[in-house]
């Protein structure tokens, strides 16, 4: 039996990258010169979608000529425009025929790859493909999703695995909190890091700090970490580097710090409930989180109970730098900085961040 492969989703960059990877697995890196491959551009400007589908139908129904096997790639088909195209009788008839052909077992000699973003998972074509195709459905990481950071880390791990590379926990924490959710940008950052550490295949935090693009997210991550570590010089440096390359990102830096401080406070409380010392080793922290009863999860809160174990471990470690009485004071300082920055000028915003760093990083007496 032949193969039918479908690559779609709402992440256009990932869809194109995965389809190219599949084709390289089938034909090698120089797939354009493979005599057994027929490439059908799905985004050809001069052809209507119905004509493109007719070409696919003709190709599926035509036996191989120059080789014993045949591969067809319908590349970059605009599934996202199907709702408009379905009004065309020619398109509807052609699409029904494609669906009919792909619903049946393909000849042993034939492999069909169809790629293009925007296929609706509620459509009959998607449901048929779920049963008949080798399906790759690639979705953008939604930062409003409950588990978006875990999904992002999964994406980073998968891409690194495809490159035969690894990453330290610190570096993963940096990347997952600083590069955003755009898959193209994430791949680009990882490719830069791999080029920097070559011939090694392991990415560490030092490489991330030297090579990763100075995005507002990266600056916010550096500033938040400096505050939690109470390292004044590092906090000043994070402000300077971030604002020099990303003017107008002051509020993003502040909100990131506020979120980190709230997480630290929650972890500090959870650690006490769980009987964990701030000096506990990572294996002990991980084991304690994984062994939480439902009652304990409810007591410390679902978001903390489901936190990545390494992030919990690092926040617990940082919490030892703040006494119980200091945390409300630090939160007040953050809110005071927010009030100053909302009402002040750009210069005042930067000064407010610097004053915040001074007040938070100074050691309690």
Image (cartoon, rainbow, N blue to C red):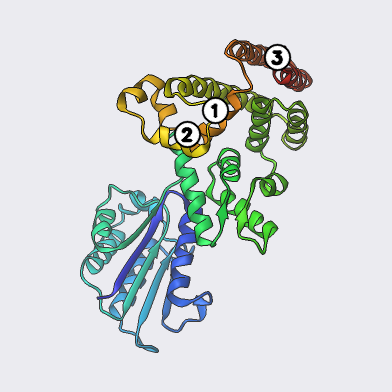
Rendered view: 205 above or below 328: below
Kindly tell me whether residue 112 is visible in this rendering.
yes
Q: Secondary structure at mark 3?
A: loop
Query: What is the quadrant of the N terminus in the image?
Result: bottom left
CA gap between label 2 and label 1 equals 9 Å
Kindly tell me whether residue 142 is visible in this rendering.
no
Rendered view: 217 above or below 51: above
Query: Sequence order check: which comes first, mark 2 or mark 1?
Result: 2
* Crowd band around label 2 with a 10 angstrom C-alpha radius: few (<14), some (14–19), many (20+): many
CA gap between label 3 and label 2 equals 27 Å
Residue identifier under label 1? 316
Q: Secondary structure at mark 1?
A: helix
Query: What is the quadrant of the C terminus in the image?
Result: top right
Rendered view: 118 above or below 115: above
Query: Sequence order check: which comes first, mark 3 or mark 2?
Result: 2
Q: Are marks 2 and 1 in contact (CB under 8 Å)?
A: yes
Q: Which residue is pictured at 31% across the width and 49% down the height?
A: 121
Rendered view: 207 above or below 325: below
In the displayed structure, does residue 9 sit left or right of residue 207?
left
Q: Which mark is residue 364?
A: 3
In the displayed structure, does residue 214 sit left or right of residue 294?
right
* Crowd band around label 1 with a 10 angstrom C-alpha radius: few (<14), some (14–19), many (20+): many
Residue identifier under label 2? 285
Where in the figure is residue 205, as x and y percent of width and height? 65, 45
CA gap between label 3 and label 1 equals 18 Å
Between 332 and 28, which is closer to the camera in this rendering? 332
* Crowd band around label 3 with a 10 angstrom C-alpha radius: few (<14), some (14–19), many (20+): few
Where in the figure is residue 248, as x and y percent of width and height? 70, 29
Where in the figure is residue 308, as x and y percent of width and height? 47, 36
- Res. 231 image quadrant: top right
């Amino acid at each position: 039996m032949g193969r039918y492969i479908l690559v779609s989703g709402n992440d256009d960059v990932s869809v194109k990258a995965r389809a190219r990877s599949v084709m390289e697995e089938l034909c090698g890196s120089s797939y354009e010169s493979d005599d057994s491959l027929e490439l059908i551009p799905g985004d050809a400007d001069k052809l209507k979608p119905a004509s493109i589908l007719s070409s696919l139908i003709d190709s599926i129904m035509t036996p191989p000529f120059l080789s014993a096997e045949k591969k067809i790639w319908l590349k970059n088909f605009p599934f996202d425009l199907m709702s408009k195209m379905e009004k065309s009788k020619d398109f509807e008839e052609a699409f029904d025929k494609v669906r009919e052909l792909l619903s049946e077992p393909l000849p042993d000699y034939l492999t069909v790859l169809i790629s293009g973003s925007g296929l609706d998972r509620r459509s009959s074509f998607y449901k048929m493909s779920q049963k008949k195709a080798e399906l790759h459905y690639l979705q953008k990481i939604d930062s409003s999703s409950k588990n978006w950071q875990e999904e992002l880390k999964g994406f980073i791990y998968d891409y690194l695995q495809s490159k035969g590379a690894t990453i330290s926990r610190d570096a993963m924490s940096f990347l997952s909190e600083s590069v955003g959710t755009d898959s193209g940008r994430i791949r680009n950052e990882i490719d830069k890091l791999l080029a920097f550490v070559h011939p090694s295949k392991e990415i560490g935090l030092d490489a991330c700090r030297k090579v990763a693009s100075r995005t507002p997210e990266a600056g916010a991550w550096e500033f938040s970490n400096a505050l939690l570590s109470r390292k004044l010089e590092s906090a000043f440096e994070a402000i300077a580097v971030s604002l020099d390359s990303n003017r107008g990102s002051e509020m993003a830096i502040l909100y990131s710090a506020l979120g980190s401080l709230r997480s630290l406070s929650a972890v500090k409380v959870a650690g006490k409930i769980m009987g964990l010392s701030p000096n506990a080793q990572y294996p002990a922290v991980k084991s304690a989180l994984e062994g939480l009863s439902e009652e304990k999860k409810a007591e410390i809160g679902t978001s903390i109970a489901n936190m990545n174990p390494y992030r919990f471990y690092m926040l617990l470690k940082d919490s030892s730098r703040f006494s119980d009485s200091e945390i409300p004071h630090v939160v007040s300082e953050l809110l005071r900085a927010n009030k100053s920055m909302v009402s002040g000028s750009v210069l005042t915003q930067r000064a407010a961040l610097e004053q915040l760093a001074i007040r938070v990083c100074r050691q309690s007496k």
